[in-house]
């Protein structure tokens, strides 16, 4: 009998995207699948829209707002599948994504091989998605996957993964204490527990950028604390596989790549990471100060300066997003 795949969709205020996301799950050519949608206390029409898709194949549940990790864990507790497909509520899967991955799977649900795929980033039109291969797009041993991620600061979004039941149970639930980089921490944990990472180039998913309601756009003190904790945990996963000069050097490089997000003369989180880098035999360099940041800092202080620059970056990204939306509408009308 073919393996059952559980597609778990955590959703919070995703009324603009949730229909397309559910349809991409329903369109999978792999026949044995269940779709579990967990509404995380949305205040818009997400739950109403999702409920319209309810069937024997689609289960919709709701909970008080507890965050994406708690919603994923809720879905996982309900899942019956031999494999878990994570899918964010604004992203999409190509119709044959799961089929292509499972065609090359080994030993079914008892496998400790992590399956990954290609992915593209898009704003509105997924058929115009930008596909940017990295060195993670190949078969790798766990330690090599983490070394590449740390040294090159490259990533894979959750939609690319297809995780066997054995691996899922071995690593445990998502960390509900993390409000930033919870997916980065989870996948580093899964990779560290796997036998190998198998990249399936025929499989494809689509990651939506420019979602300004996303928590990843928030740099509050709580978010910075969460990011610091996630980095600490991820480093521990790599060192558990190999504690050597090359892995410690990669860990310091990984910490350095996040310094611009965490640095402040008064930031306790940064001080902790600086101490961790010292323990690993390295140092964290103070980031070069953007001249705009320097001006705003002198006038309004550190926090206000950071807030202004973050808002400026959001406005720029939003302008690009709106342009893509208009272009998408025009192209669809032409066709």
Image (spheres, helix red, strand yellow):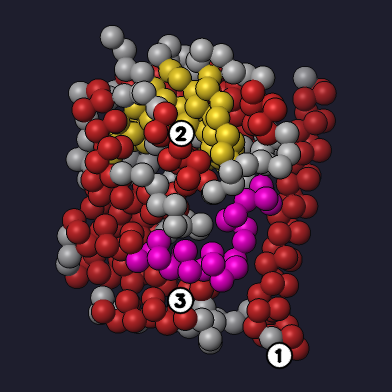
The quarter of the rendered structure image containing the C terminus is top right
Range shown magenta: 211-232
Q: Helix, strand, or loop for circle 3?
A: helix
Residue 112: image location, x then y, percent: 22, 35
Which residue is under mark 2?
75
Q: Is residue 103 above or below residue 288?
A: above
Compare residues 78 and 163 and report the one nearer the observer: 78
Foreground mark, 2 or 1, reads: 2
Decide: few, some or many residues near mark 1? Use Cα within 10 Å; few <14, some 14-19, many ≥20: few
Residue at x 71% of width, y 78% of height = 304
Q: Is residue 23 above or below residue 31?
A: below
Residue 17: image location, x then y, percent: 67, 34
Q: Is residue 97 visible?
A: yes
Whole-number angstrom distance, CA of label 3 to CA of label 1: 23 Å
Decide: few, some or many residues near mark 3? Use Cα within 10 Å; few <14, some 14-19, many ≥20: some
For the stretch drawn in magenta, what is the main secondary structure? helix
Residue at x 81% of width, y 23% of height = 334
Q: Is residue 203 visible?
A: no
* Label at residue 269: 3
Q: Helix, strand, or loop for circle 1?
A: helix
* Label at residue 161: none
Q: Is residue 136 above or below residue 59?
A: below
For residue 138, which quarter of the picture?
Answer: top left
Residue at x 60% of width, y 54% of height = 215
Q: Residue 203 vs residue 309: left or right?
A: left
Which residue is under mark 1?
298
């Amino acid at each position: 009998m073919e393996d059952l795949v559980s597609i778990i969709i955590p959703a919070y205020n995703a009324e603009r995207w949730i229909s397309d996301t559910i349809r991409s799950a329903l369109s999978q050519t792999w026949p044995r699948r269940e779709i579990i949608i967990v509404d995380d206390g949305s205040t818009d029409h997400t739950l109403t829209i999702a409920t319209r898709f309810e069937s024997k194949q689609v289960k919709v549940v709701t909970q008080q707002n507890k965050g994406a990790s708690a919603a994923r864990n809720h879905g996982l507790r309900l899942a019956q599948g031999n494999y878990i497909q994570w899918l964010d509520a604004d992203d999409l899967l190509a119709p044959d994504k799961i089929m292509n991955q499972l065609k090359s799977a080994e030993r079914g649900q008892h496998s400790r091989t992590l399956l990954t795929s290609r992915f593209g980033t898009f704003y509105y039109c997924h058929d115009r998605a930008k596909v940017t291969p990295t060195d993670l797009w190949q078969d790798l041993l766990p330690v090599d996957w983490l070394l590449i991620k740390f040294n090159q600061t490259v990533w894979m979004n959750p939609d690319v993964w297809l995780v066997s039941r054995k691996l899922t149970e071995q690593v445990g639930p998502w960390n509900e204490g993390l409000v930033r980089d919870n997916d980065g921490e989870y996948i580093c944990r899964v990779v560290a527990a796997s036998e190998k990472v198998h990249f399936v180039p025929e499989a494809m998913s689509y990651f939506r950028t420019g979602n300004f309601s996303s928590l990843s756009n928030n740099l509050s003190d709580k978010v910075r604390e969460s990011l610091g904790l996630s980095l600490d945990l991820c480093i521990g996963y790599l060192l558990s596989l190999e504690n050597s000069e090359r892995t410690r050097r990669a860990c310091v490089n990984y910490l350095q790549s996040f310094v611009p997000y965490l640095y402040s003369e008064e930031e306790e989180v940064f001080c902790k990471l600086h101490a961790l880098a010292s323990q690993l035999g390295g140092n964290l360099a103070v980031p070069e100060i953007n001249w705009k940041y320097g001006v705003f800092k002198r006038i309004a202080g550190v926090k206000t300066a950071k807030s202004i620059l973050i808002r400026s970056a959001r406005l720029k990204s939003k302008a690009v997003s709106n342009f893509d939306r208009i272009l998408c509408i025009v192209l669809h009308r032409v066709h």
